[in-house]
Image (cartoon, helix red, strand yellow):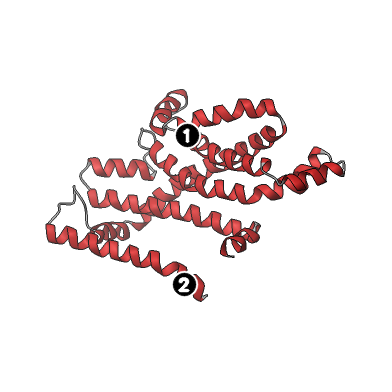
Amino acid sequence: MSSRLRSIWPPVLIAVIALVGWQLLVVVRDIQPYLLPSPSLIASNFFKDVSLMWGAGFYTGTTALLGLMFGTFLGILASLLAQRFVVVNNLITPLAAGLAAVPIIALTPILNNMFNITSRTPRVLVTTIIVFFPIFVNLLRGLVQVQPVQLELMRSMNASPRTVLRILRIPNAIPFFFTGLKVAAPLAVIAALVAEYFGGPQEGLGARIASNAANTAYGRAWAYVLAAIITGLLFYVTVLLLERWAAPWTAHRRSA
């Protein structure tokens, strides 16, 4: 417990110092809210409309979760095929790299034109595309980068490719998978948030940030930004807990 507290208090202390310095800077320099609202103003707007913050965060979080699920499924499927078939690897890897290089702001308007802008589909598709790359790359690396000695031992026992995959490759790839998932989970929230700026339903965090900023309600806009940060952190912490439950040896390996 003491070691856990030692790992927690430094970032907490830094956050407190940053918030106090931010508040003092705004008060002493008399900075207007349209330039930089104070933390106290953001907090007051957040807790005054906490139900609205929760509703917007839930809508964006649901979109991010759907995209994370679909992107993870496609990433797992593609990585399994790529490690088994060289042709598939040569086809999918450049395509995945190309999709990762396309900015979100270029994808969203195109998908909005292809699908109904009032539906959740374009935002889920954007999130799925963003999530796919870190899952695919990390999991494929874990499936391929096995110990040569272990692979040679499996071959000497005349093990089938399916047996090698089940006994050797998949256990070796689990830490790599969670590394990709820890990157993909916050990215899913960011992708869903950015996609909401380009029209469509106004229930999400991105739309609320844009509309409040346009109406000069800067404190409330930053309060929605705070709600977005909390949503992203919840996704990340959930992945950490899932990793601790599904692969506890990875946490012990990092702490050793």
Instruction: Tell which of 135 and 207 is nearer to you.
Output: 135
Q: Is residue 46 visible?
A: yes
Q: Quadrant of the C terminus?
A: bottom right
Q: CA distance from mark 2 to mark 1?
A: 38 Å
* SS for dot 2: helix
* SS for dot 1: helix
Residue type at numbered disc 2: Leu
Which residue is denoted by mark 2 in the rendering?
Answer: 5
Q: Position of residue 9 (x, y in %)?
A: 41, 69
Instruction: Tell which of 200 and 27 is nearer to you.
Output: 27
Q: Position of residue 74 (x, y in %)?
A: 61, 36
- Residue at image coords 51%, 72%: 3
Instruction: Tell which of 104 and 174 is nearer to you.
Output: 174
User: Can you say whether 150 is above or below 27 in the image?
Assistant: above
Mark 2 or mark 1: whose residue is earlier in sequence: 2
Residue 246's label in the rendered image is none
The quadrant in which residue 132 appears is: top right
Q: Is residue 70 visible?
A: no
User: Can you say whether 108 is above or below 249 in the image?
Assistant: above
Q: Nearer the viewer, mark 2 or mark 1?
A: 2
Q: Position of residue 215 (x, y in %)?
A: 22, 42
The quadrant in which residue 204 appears is: top left
* Disc 2 and disc 1 in contact, CB within 8 angstroms: no
Which residue is denoted by mark 1 in the rendering?
Answer: 126
